[in-house]
Amino acid sequence: YPRLNSISVVPAGLTKYRKKLFKLIPYDRESSAQVIQQVELLQGNNVNKYGSRIVFLADEFYIMSQKDIPKYEEYEEFPQIENGVGLLASLGYEIDVALKTIKTKLNSCQNLQREVSIATGVSAYSFVKTQAEKIMEKQSSLRIHVYPIKNTFFGENITVTGLLTGKDILEQLTGKKLGENLLLCSSMFKAGEEIMLDDITIKEIESVLSIDIIKVENIGEDFVNKILGI
């Protein structure tokens, strides 16, 4: 430091395709808590010595350990957000800001009956559900269904939203109550395209589920606006 600006600590993604490979044990609640304790001690030392935490933990560790996500300020300038480090803290903060600044938009939608659904990875499910409930509290005419999608394509140890596939979404949402729009995070798709990791397209999902899909960026304002349809 400062030549090395930041480090992210991220759990290895263990797929089901590991035959004849060295055995690796997935993190659980206890081992994740141990990693958090270890890194928080290192962060404290770094703040005292350098004025920066330098090392940041992936959101997955907090989810697996069932510990609270650190506060927004603790991620400093979010140098590792593209690696899933601080993404939930950033998104939660931005959603709160958006809800405080869209009173006029909400008033114009008070009589608008709207029902939408969100498909998300297992690890982010509780967070997304909490955010959806926040928005519904502000807008009584709105109904949001949040569905956790298990990753059978790569294996159920893979729980992040960005590695979901069209096949799993189709199999697990067929017959579910979806409303007028299905919201999918843009991280599920190949960059700049409307194709998922298993080459299933948005149009194919729309055709099978008979619903219009809306891609959502990992930005709080975009999340709120697209849920409200504004």
Image: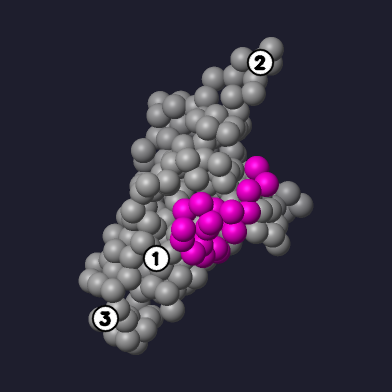
> Which residue does the image show at 44% across and 27% down from the upper left?
28
Amino acid type of the residue that numbered disc 1 sits on in the rendered structure = Glu
Marks 2 and 3, how far apart at CA? 55 Å
Q: Which residues are magenta?
A: 198-217
Instruction: Residue 35 in the image: state x and y as whole percent.
Output: 50, 32
Instruction: Residue 104 in the image: state x and y as whole percent.
Output: 34, 87
Is residue 166 among what the camera can see? Answer: yes
Instruction: Residue 220 in the image: state x and y as whole percent.
Output: 47, 67
Q: Nearer the viewer, residue 92 or 45?
A: 92
Q: Secondary structure at mark 2?
A: loop
Instruction: For label 1, count other residues whose C-alpha is less than 10 Å away and answer few (under 14), some (14-19) or many (20+).
Output: few
Q: Secondary structure at mark 3?
A: loop
Q: Nearer the viewer, residue 107 or 87?
A: 107
Amino acid type of the residue that numbered disc 2 sits on in the rendered structure = Lys
Q: Residue furthest right?
A: 3
Q: Tell me, for residue 180, which label it has, or none.
A: 1
Instruction: For label 3, count other residues whose C-alpha is less than 10 Å away and answer few (under 14), some (14-19) or many (20+).
Output: few
Q: Find residue 115 and report its image quarter.
A: bottom left
Instruction: For label 2, count other residues whose C-alpha is less than 10 Å away and answer few (under 14), some (14-19) or many (20+).
Output: few
